[in-house]
Image (tube, rainbow, N blue to C red):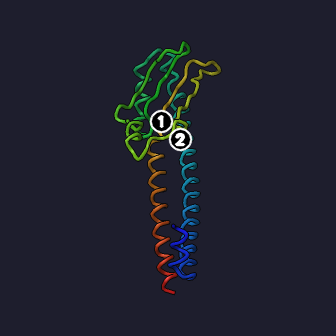
Amino acid sequence: MFNSFFRDSLSIKTKLMFVTSIAVSFSLFLVLSFFIYLSFVNEQSKLHTRLTIQTEIIANNVVPAVLFDDPSSAEEILTALRVDSTIRGAKISINTDTAFASYDNPTRDEAGRLKKTFFNLPYWVEKQIIIEKNILNETDTIGKVTITACLFNLYLSFLQNISIAILISLITLILTFLLSNAL
């Protein structure tokens, strides 16, 4: 039915314009998608680097609190993470793997909000980043800092950019067809 519609009702010029419009729009979509993917990977790498730096800073600053068994000072150091909107929580564990101090951000329910967006992410998509760093006193390991961050904002930005790429491709399809039809 689709083949007969194009074979019988449209001239060769219209068919060529239609195929050219689709090819240009599809090419533009592929290029935009590639750049969006590169941007996504770059942002994820920058987030991982930033979280690693924050974990190292906390691991260095919390040494006295762990040595002098002062959990309130350690929690105060961890609450500095509240300014980072991607961090869901942090924990300081001592060598016996017991929690020495922790910080949870209850207002950050990105995982729940992510499920309520366009679609559920596949199980294989990484939904959070966990960074761990040993707390060292000279050469002895006296504990471990763990920071957990959610990737909600990163995925939401990625979905918005893909939606914009689709919209631009559709507009390009229409404009290409209209401009080539005027010639």
Between 164 and 84, the one lying in front of the other is 164
Q: Secondary structure at mark 1?
A: strand
Q: Give the structural element (helix, strand or loop) at label 2.
A: helix
Furthest toward the top, the residue is 96
Residue drawn at 54 percent across, 12 percent down: 96
**Three-letter amino acid code at the position of disc 1:** Ala
Residue tagged 1: 149
Q: Residues within 10 Å of mark 2 (few under 14, many from 20)?
A: few
Give the residue at the far left of this rendering.
Answer: 107
Q: Residue at x 58, y 62 (%)?
A: 31
Identify the residue at horizontal 44%, vertical 39% (top origin). Answer: 86
State the count of labels: 2
Q: Nearer the viewer, residue 21 or 13?
A: 13
- Please tell me the numbered disc located at residue 182: none
The x and y percentages for residue 101 are: 44, 21
Judged by depth in the image, the label closer to the viewer, 2 or 1, is 1
Q: Identify the image quadrant of residue 82.
A: top left
Residue tagged by mark 2?
A: 50
Residue 44 location, quadrant: top right
- Which percent across, then down, holds residue 61? 51, 28
Distance between mark 2 and mark 1 Cα atoms: 11 Å
Q: Is residue 181 above or below residue 42?
A: below
